Every structure is written in C-alpha cells, then in structure tokens.
Amino acid sequence: MNIRPQTGTILFPRDDAAAVAFARAAGLTAYPEALALMEARARAIAEGDAGELVWLVEHPPLYTAGTSARQSDLVEPGRFPVFDAGRGGQYTYHGPGQRVAYLMLDLKRRRQDVRAFVQALEEWIIRALARHDIAGERRETGVGVWVERPDGPGAEKIAAIGIRLRRWVSFHGIAINVRPDLSHFAGIVPCGIPGAGVTSLAERGVDLSLAEFDRSLKAAFEEVFGPATPIEEA
C-alpha cells in the first residue's frame, strides 16, 4: 500500500504567512512544567509579546483528565499520576514513546472557528501518518484519528486531540502513539469510549524514533497550517 500525502492549498493559514516556531524538549517533561509553559506562552501570544509555537514533548507515564472526564473512567486510580488538564475531552494517557505536540496558535490571525481548527488538527495527523503508509481516518465515535483494525471490522485510536482556547489562542494539542507501551492505556477508559482499542505506529509495523516521526509531523504541519521554522532543540 502506498498512501500519498495530499498537497495543495494550505487549509488553516496565518493571515501574514509568518513561520511558526517548532521546538523539541529534551528528555521527559513533567506535566505541571508543560502546563505552566503553555499557559505563559499563550498569554504572551494574546498580548502580542510572543510568536506562535509548536512544542514537541514526551512525558513520563501519567493520565490527564479533561473537562468532561468521568471518575468511573479512571479504572486504576493509583497506577500513574493523574492531572487535571483543563482542556476539553476526557481521560488520556501520556508516556514515553508517544509524541505530544502542544500548539500555541493565534486563531485571530487564522480563523476564529473551533470546529475548523479541530478538523485541521485531524488532517495534520492524517497527513503525517500517510507518509508512513498508515491510513488514518476520522470517526463519528469521537475527536481524534483512527485506523482500521487489521484483523476485522472496527477501528483503533492512534492519536488523540484535546485543546483549549483563551482569547482565541490555543494551547494543549495532540498526542500520537508512535511507540508507547500500549498496556498503560488499560488504567483508563480512553477518551471515555468503552471498548475502544488503541494502537501505535510500532504496532502497525512502522519502526521509527520520535525524532524521525517529527520530520513527518513538521512537513504535514506546513501543508495544513503554513510555514514553520526548523525544529529547535529546547
């Protein structure tokens, strides 16, 4: 199978076509540290004191609870630390081998349309996966990106999306399962969907490091959101 990424008109461009900064954190980033940085950067963007940023991180094993999280969906409360994320959505797992991309984008300079923004995030993920012959797709069961089960009907989730907007500046973002320990998802009901399976690029036979996948992620980002700077190690 050869899935070719789509090309053409940028879907969610910035009005002045300014390049978005891409930065990658070294090692594992503690969740409270990530939350503090995101909130500070989003505030600075809203005030005109900083530019847009995509921040690529990897977390130690943890669960985050979105604003719609149900306590009953936390199946193993003591397994990993649990953080109140403040984003939309329900419970999500983050951990080593999963690429988390936090987006601090100014939708006033793009399009003040939350639904279109979420669809653009899904398209970004789908195009990045396509570069590795993985057919990601949207599903009515929930926001995120799914892939067909290899052994029968139905789909498994490969990427989650959870965002928040403040003064039309986004923060939080996406999480793509590159090569995480999928057994760690058993401590929650992922995204509040009972029986929802999860998968990863590695489980689908794609052997990549996070840094290697980042190149696909950045190329796909530029197709959907416009120019970006080279990835800076931060």
Image (tube, rainbow, N blue to C red):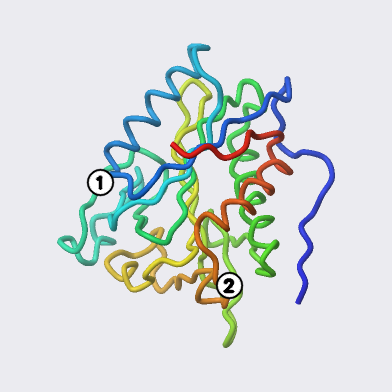
| Residue projecting furthest to the left | 78
Q: Which residue is depicted at the point 49% across and 71% down?
A: 199
Q: Position of residue 42 (x, y in %)?
A: 45, 24
* Screen quadrant of the C terminus: top left
* Above or below, 56 relative to 200: above
**Residue at 69% of width from left, 47% of height from top?**
219
Q: Circle 1 sits in a helix, a strand or a loop, which is it? A: strand
Q: Amino acid at mark 2?
A: Val
Residue 198 rendering spot, x and y as whole percentages? 46, 70
* Residue 42 left/right relative to 146: left
- Which image quarter holds the N terminus? bottom right
Residue position marked by numbered label 2 in the rendering = 206
Report the label total: 2
Q: Nearer the viewer, residue 60 or 78?
A: 60
Sequence-wise, the earlier of marks 1 and 2 is 1
Front residue of this view, candidates 161 and 57: 57
Classify residue 30 by image quadrant: top left
Q: Which mark is residue 83?
A: 1
